[in-house]
Amino acid sequence: MNYPIISIIGAGHMGSSLLGGLIQSGHPADKLWVSDKDKEKLQSLQTQLHIHITENNEQAVAHADIVIFAIKPQIFGEVARELRSAIFAKRPLLISIAAGIRTHHIEKWLDTKIALVRAMPNTPSLIGCGASALYANANVTHENRNAAESILRAVGIVVWVGDEKALDVVTALSGSGPAYYFLLMEAMQKTAEELGLSSETARLLTLQTALGAARMAMESKNSPEELRRQVTSPGGTTEKAVSVLEENNIHGIFKEALHAASARSEELASLLGDK
Ligand SMILES: NC(=O)c1ccc[n+]([C@@H]2O[C@H](COP(=O)([O-])OP(=O)(O)OC[C@H]3O[C@@H](n4cnc5c(N)ncnc54)[C@H](OP(=O)(O)O)[C@@H]3O)[C@@H](O)[C@H]2O)c1
């Protein structure tokens, strides 16, 4: 198999997870580069994964067939402008995982039209259980799409969206979503403790219930609504609890929360793009 040379700019949480995932999925270490300002971080990654390291972003780009931007959104503009000529010379496929940085911002900073995939992963990518949505601009070829998809698949599942605006909804759903589940777990565990369970028992039962429900929903052909009906016997305990949640407008609360997160994602994107 002919593996592309991939360079990752930024050896932080996501950059390191992607490198780990790529190595695990069989990508040869000598076809992976990572650049960062932090020498210690780089050296520790090299010891662990035997990849190429550099403190010079331009050097990383000069080697690459694919460049992944895994830096914070706040510094994206500055880093992209510095890499303008290196990218123009090599014309690699670019993948950005930076939240809120739109493709037209990147094209503006690089001052060129280039094949560009935007990915919106989420925190569970750090343990290989992520959910990423990808958007490709008009210069992305079929081969580029496959390459981008297999990279993000190294840290979880991947879906494509045809409209860049959909990434704001993705941000509200799967991007921020882990926090909604953590909040739910927090509330369930706390209440179980108030009702008399020890903290460890409440914690274990809460977490395994979340995992079990997620796995059942993934493995079943039935919708979550149908699965919920199946565990809700008339006059039973689940029905009682669900009716309290519905009387308190659980659907409306989630609707409002996701609308607010999506609108905030749009707002942040315009602030970041002006930098
Ligand atoms: N973490 C997530 O779950 C998640 C989910 C979705 C999207 N994302 C996106 O992924 C991107 C990275 O997030 P992260 O959590 O991995 O952040 P992070 O841990 O802070 O990683 C960013 C890395 O870039 C380094 N860096 C700073 N300036 C640089 C430069 N000029 N050149 C090269 N490297 C430089 C940072 O070094 P210093 O620490 O020394 O500054 C750090 O090691 C962000 O844009 C974020 O929006 C993250």
Image: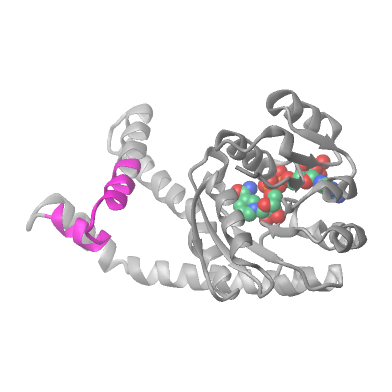
Q: What kind of secondary structure does the magenta stretch mostly adopt?
A: helix
Residue 269 placed where, x, y %? 70, 70
Residue 116 placed where, x, y %? 70, 65
**Is 81 on the left or on the right of 103, as rendered?**
right
Residue 186 in the image: above or below residue 104: above
Q: Residue at x 17, y 52 (%)?
A: 238
Residue 259 in the image: above or below residue 203: below
Q: Residue at x 38, y 41 (%)?
A: 190
Q: Nearer the viewer, residue 265 or 217?
A: 217
Residue lying furthest top in this view?
47
Callout count: 0
Residue 186, image quadrant: top left
User: Is residue 62 on the magenta stretch?
Assistant: no
Q: Residue at x 29, y 31 (%)?
A: 197
Residue 245, image quadrant: bottom left
Residue 193 placed where, x, y %? 34, 36
Q: Residue at x 71, y 71 (%)?
A: 103
Q: Is residue 162 visible?
A: yes
Magenta span: 211-232
